[in-house]
Image (spheres, helix red, strand yellow):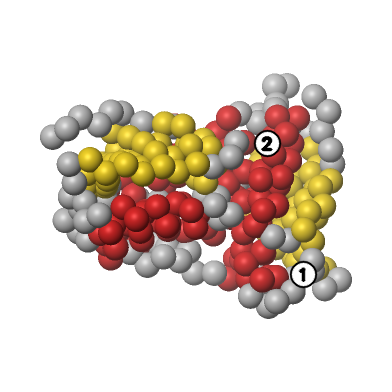
Amino acid sequence: MAFTSDLKVEDSVAFITLTGELDASVAGQFKSIVEQAASAGPSKLVVYMDKLEFMASAGLRVLIFAKQKMGVGVSIYLIGCQELVKGTLEMSGFHQSVYMQDNYAEA
Amino acid sequence: MECDNRLNVAANLDSLGAIGQFIKDAAECAGLDKRAAYNLRLAVDEIATNIVMHGYEEASLNGNIEVSKEIREDALIITLEDSGVAFDPRTMNMPTEEDLSVPLEDRAIGGLGIYLTVNGVDRFDYERVNNHNRNIFEVKRNTIN
């Protein structure tokens, strides 16, 4: 399934929605949307993952980039990860650095 | 389900989708469960990405990647063969447990792909044969006797 990524910034929270399959051929699209999000100077980054069916390490590297670009103070929330994508995130130790939640509720 | 035994694609990133589909079909033919199929697809995707980027593009080479499958009684074997720069992925530095617990803001970028590859299959091997790289992935089948 084709990859799509979409950005919306609301009340200084950046919301990115990912769908389809995220491999190295499309990781550049994800990276540029993260750059757009970073330029808005958000306080949080919320990524909707429920329609993302596959993620290779190229996607993990963009998440590392997001954290390093936006800074330690900007928490990253990954919402609704599918089980197998979640397995990759956990195997890579990302669950220790980001909030993995079923839903995002305004804190 | 009918499954092709071979797929030959141009060595560029746009071919990753076709390789992924070939692996999904092969996994289904071999009766792998969802997790084993996903992890195999991920492992092959990571190595194919390395072949394209380091074996061909960085060296300004063009060529192909041939993907083949063999279903044995006890295992599914996937082989990637390419004529790019000689490279044994097993020589790459893999992140340690300690590296993987470093917070993202302090993380180094490299090594995750090979880590996911090695951890995603039952056996990962590399051979150099007739000036070709051959990467071999093996996943056990849970056949009911």
Could you tell me which chain the residue with mark 1 belongs to? B
- Residue occupying the point 52% across, 46% down: A22
In the rendered image, residue A101, in percent from the top left (x then y), is placed at 28, 33
Which of these two is toward me, A24 or A91? Answer: A24
What is the distance, in whole Å, between disc 1 and disc 2 at their CAs?
26 Å
Q: Which residue is farthest top?
A: B145
Q: Which residue is farthest left?
A: A107
Residue B121 shown left or right of residue A90 in the figure:
right
| Quadrant of the drawing holding the C terminus of chain B | top right
Which of these two is toward me, B113 or B61? Answer: B61
Up/down of A56 relative to B12, above or below? above
Q: Quadrant of residue A82?
A: top left
Residue A73 shown left or right of residue B142 in the figure:
left
Q: Report the amino acid beneath label 1.
A: Asn
Q: Secondary structure at mark 1?
A: loop
Up/down of A91 relative to B140, above or below? below
Up/down of A86 relative to A44, above or below? above
* Lower sequence index among marks 1 and 2: 2
In the rendered image, residue A77, in percent from the top left (x then y), is placed at 27, 42
- Residue occupying the point 79% across, 37% down: B71
Q: Secondary structure at mark 2?
A: helix
In the rendered image, residue A23, in percent from the top left (x then y), is placed at 55, 50
Kindly tell me whether residue B74 is visible in this rendering: no
In the rendered image, residue B94, in percent from the top left (x then y), is placed at 47, 64
Q: Which residue is mark 2?
A: B24
Residue B62, label in figure: 1
Residue B28, label in figure: none
Mark 1 and mark 2 residues within 8 Å of each other at the beta carbon: no
Which of these two is toward me, A103 or B123? Answer: A103
